[in-house]
Image (tube, rainbow, N blue to C red):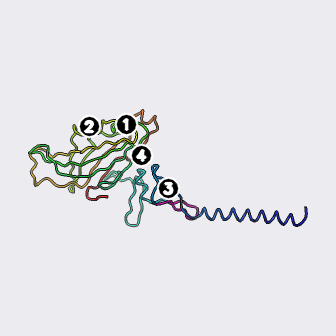
Amino acid sequence: MNVNSKTLKSKVKMTALLIGLASVALAASGTYKLLVNGTTSKVPALIQNGQVYIPIEILKAVGIPYTVQNGVVAVGVQGGSTEKTLLEGCLNEWLFNGIWRIKVGNLQAIQKDENTPGWGLDIEVRNGSKMTLNMTDTGVDGAGLGMHLAFKDATTLGVDPYDVQKLTFKNLPQSATAKQQLKFYYPIWTPDSSVEKPVKLLLDIDPARLGYSVKQAGVAFSTPNPGFRVNLTCDK
């Protein structure tokens, strides 16, 4: 082998090395297409120094709670004994716990009869799993014992236990949706002066009551506490 061929091989190796280094440099910054629950996000994932970053708002879409307060970003269940860490959102905002997507809206005053005032709240529930389910299969109480409206003074009002069963026991195939007005009534003869506008909807879900067949099918919540807390004073 002559010198010229050796020199040529050396140049080829050096060129290949430079191309490889250039590829690494390109991979160290830029963007990736971001899919969230199978839907393309309007905001891409960013690549900086070889690390991939996604918008923090995406966490809520996949059922991971977070808060941003006083310069601290807290992700997931933070513990504490005073209040459960639930998935939080506003009116007309979709929330997802890995199985159920819910959206609530149209809070309005209603009457059970002329002596029983109450509040109505529209809810849309969508099955985000891969099998037919009803809400009681996944730790939701059939009579709605975990569904409450909360008021500023920390008092609560429970959902109508009979009417709500049309929702909690309804079988929904994959991606199917159910819509219903949740009804919350005060005790009979409650005076108008005691009727105040609620500030939150609380929907408790017990993950320990996830059905055996549901677990066997690989269906699971994406967050340790899959219940929902909806702020009724904000609207998306």
Q: Quadrant of the N terminus?
A: bottom right
In the structure shown, which secondary structural element does the residue marked by tag 3 occupy? loop
Q: Residue furthest right?
A: 2
In the structure shown, which secondary structural element does the residue marked by tag 1 occupy? loop
Task: Give the amino acid type for the residue marked by disc 4 in the picture.
Answer: Gly
Based on the picture, tell me whether residue 48 belongs to the magenta stretch: yes
Which one is closest to the eye, mark 4 or mark 3? 3
Q: Is residue 144 left or right of residue 33?
A: left
**Near-viewer residue (38 or 213):** 38
Which picture quadrant has residue 72?
Answer: bottom left
Instruction: Please provide percent x and percent y for residue 80.
Output: 36, 53
Q: Residue at x 33, y 48 (%)?
A: 102
**How far apart are the two marked residues, 1 and 2, measured between alpha carbons?**
14 Å
**How far apart are the two marked residues, 4 and 1, measured between alpha carbons?**
13 Å
Which residue corresponds to mark 2? 166
Q: Is residue 85 visible?
A: no
Task: Give the amino acid type for the residue marked by disc 3 in the picture.
Answer: Leu
Instruction: Please provide percent x and percent y for residue 208.
Output: 38, 39
**How far apart are the two marked residues, 4 and 3, measured between alpha carbons?**
18 Å
Q: Which mark is residue 98?
A: 4
Question: Earlier along the polypeptide chain: callout 4 or callout 3?
Answer: 3
Classed neighbour count for the residue bearing mark 2: other residues with Cα under 10 Å, few (<14), some (14–19), many (≥20): some
